[in-house]
Image: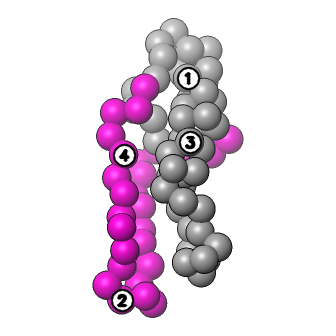
Amino acid sequence: MPLRACCGSRSRSEDRPRRATGLRRIRDYSLPKEWRRLQENHGQTSFIGKILILEREALPERGVVVLIRDGVGF
């Protein structure tokens, strides 16, 4: 079962976490939680397979929508 984690920010550019911080959050926070959840519920583990990084938005007022089939949250 794939890891379904989203890290993002809509704050001003000077307040945004750096890319390395976001990737670290995925590896150090989201992945271990998903790993434990899958191990307890399904007897398998998780891994990070793909990471999508959106570098910038052409129009600052536009938002980004992430569609996920399953409910997520910890």
The three-letter code of the residue at mark 1 reads: Trp
| 26 vs 43, nearest the viewer | 26
The crowd level at tag 3 (other Cα within 10 Å; few <14, some 14-19, many 20+) is few
In front here: 71 or 17? 17
- Write down the residue under mark 1: 35
- Which amino acid is tagged 3? Arg
Residue 24 is tagged as 3
Q: Residues within 10 Å of mark 1 (few under 14, many from 20)?
A: some
Label 3 to label 1: alpha-carbon separation: 16 Å
C-alpha distance separating marks 4 and 2: 23 Å
**For marks 3 and 1 on the same chain, the one whose residue lies earlier in the sequence:** 3
Q: What is the quadrant of the C terminus in the image?
A: top right
Taking the spot 59% from the left edge, 44% from the top edge, the residue there is: 25
Q: Secondary structure at mark 2?
A: loop
Q: Is residue 46 above or below residue 44?
A: below
Q: Tell which tag, 2 or 1, sits nearer the viewer.
A: 2
The numbered disc on residue 51 is 4
Q: Is residue 53 magenta?
A: yes
Identify the amino acid type marked 4.
Ile
The residue that label 2 is drawn on is 59
User: Which portion, as a residue range, is magenta?
Assistant: 47-74
